[in-house]
Amino acid sequence: MVDSTSFATVILLAAAASLLFAAMLYPATLLRWFQRKRYQYEVTFSLYMLTSTEKFIFNSVLFLLLSLFIIAASLYLPEHLNIITRRLSYYFSGNEDTLAASAQKVGQQVVASSLSPNALLPQNGLGGALAGQGRGIMDP
């Protein structure tokens, strides 16, 4: 099975190859397209009326913010999506075995990973509320 990193790499390489292929076939058209996109960017953000120093500062800040956003998304989004899918599977199935099994499958540490799934249940007889990993129960 192909993991997400390999898939993303293949997509990026395919996009770069198609861009290179288009540049070799139609260099003038591609150059005009880039000029039009640069013009649209400058008009949209009103950069055409700034000095070159102000443009540099604005573009640097924008590049820094976008870089931080992309790095944060690539680091934290896969794990967050994994947590969301595990919770959705728990909400749909209503089975604590699925939650514990999926958490062990992805390599996450479960509070009671070596214990049976029934050990996650509280011992005070309140029913099926999960205890551990931030999911607490209210005591009456």
Image (cartoon, helix red, strand yellow):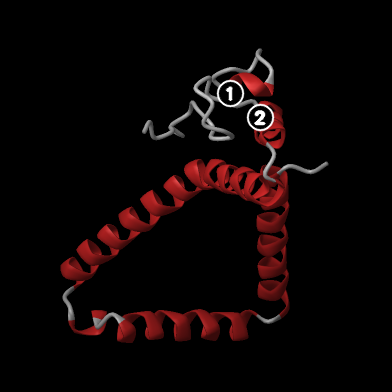
Residue 4 in the image: state x and y as whole percent.
Answer: 68, 46
Residue 47 in the image: state x and y as whole percent.
Answer: 25, 79
- Where is 36 relative to 22, above or below? below
Observer-nearest of 12 and 120: 120
Residue 17, quarter of picture: bottom right
Instruction: From the image, tell me which residue sits under label 1.
Output: 120
- Where is 123 relative to 42, above or below? above
Instruction: From the image, tell me which residue sits under label 2.
Output: 100
* Outermost top residue: 114
Residue 51, quarter of picture: bottom left
Left or right of residue 40: residue 56: left
Q: In the rendered structure, which amino acid carries the disc numbered 2?
A: Ala
Instruction: Tell me the tag on residue 60.
Output: none
Q: Which tag, 1 or 2, sits closer to the chain's start?
A: 2
- Mark 1 or mark 2, which is nearer to you? 1
Are dots 1 and 2 in contact, CB under 8 Å? yes
Residue 40 in the image: state x and y as whole percent.
Answer: 39, 85
Q: In the rendered structure, which amino acid carries the disc numbered 1?
A: Leu
- Where is 79 relative to 100, above or below? below
Picture quarter with the C terminus: top left
The answer for how far apart the CA atoms under marks 1 and 2 are is 9 Å
* Outermost right residue: 1
